[in-house]
Amino acid sequence: MSLVSIIKGSRLTCVVCGRVFPEGQGIVIRYKDKMLTFHSKSCAVKFFRYYIENVDPSCIDKYINKLIDDFQKYREIKSKKKILAE
Ligand SMILES: [Zn+2]
């Protein structure tokens, strides 16, 4: 990290549109040695939609129902907490 970037704060580049944005904003997802940086939710959605359309379907088919189930459980837990808070 250069002295200039320490003083000014790190700048990240959106992997979808190339826009440069300050660290702490946007969406950053680390995967192994990769850093997926998106300046906005719309660029993140665009990336993951493209990912789903282009990855080998056998990889996606294996996990898509599990992910849907996980979010179903998440929604149930969230609604129970909401009821308890009321
Ligand atoms: Zn972007």
Image (spheres, helix red, strand yellow):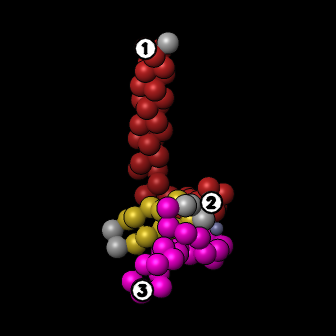
* Rendered residue at 50%/12% (across/down): 86
Q: Evaluate if marks 1 and 2 touch, with contact meaning CB atoms under 8 Å apart.
A: no
For ligand 1, tell me if the residue under mark 2 lies within 8 Å: yes
Left or right of 41: which side holds 36? Answer: left
Calculate the distance from the C-alpha at mark 1 to the C-alpha at mark 3: 50 Å
Q: Residue 5: within the magenta?
A: yes
Q: Is residue 72 visible?
A: yes
* Figure check: 17 above or below 26: below
Q: Mark 3 packing: few (<14 Cα in 10 Å), some, or many (20+)?
A: few
Mark 3 and mark 2 lie on one chain; the one further toward the N terminus is: 3
Provide the residue designation for mark 1: 84
Image location of residue 58, percent across then percent down: 45, 57
Q: Which residue is mark 2?
A: 40
Regarding mark 2 in the picture, which secondary structure is present there? loop
> Which disc number belongs to residue 26?
none
| Residue 47 appears in view | no
Amino acid carrying mark 1 in the image: Leu
- Position in image of residue 34 (x %, y %): 40, 72
Q: Amino acid at mark 2?
A: Ser
* Mark positioned earlier in the residue sequence (1 or 2): 2
Q: Which residues are magenta?
A: 1-24
Which sits in the foreground, 39 or 23? 23
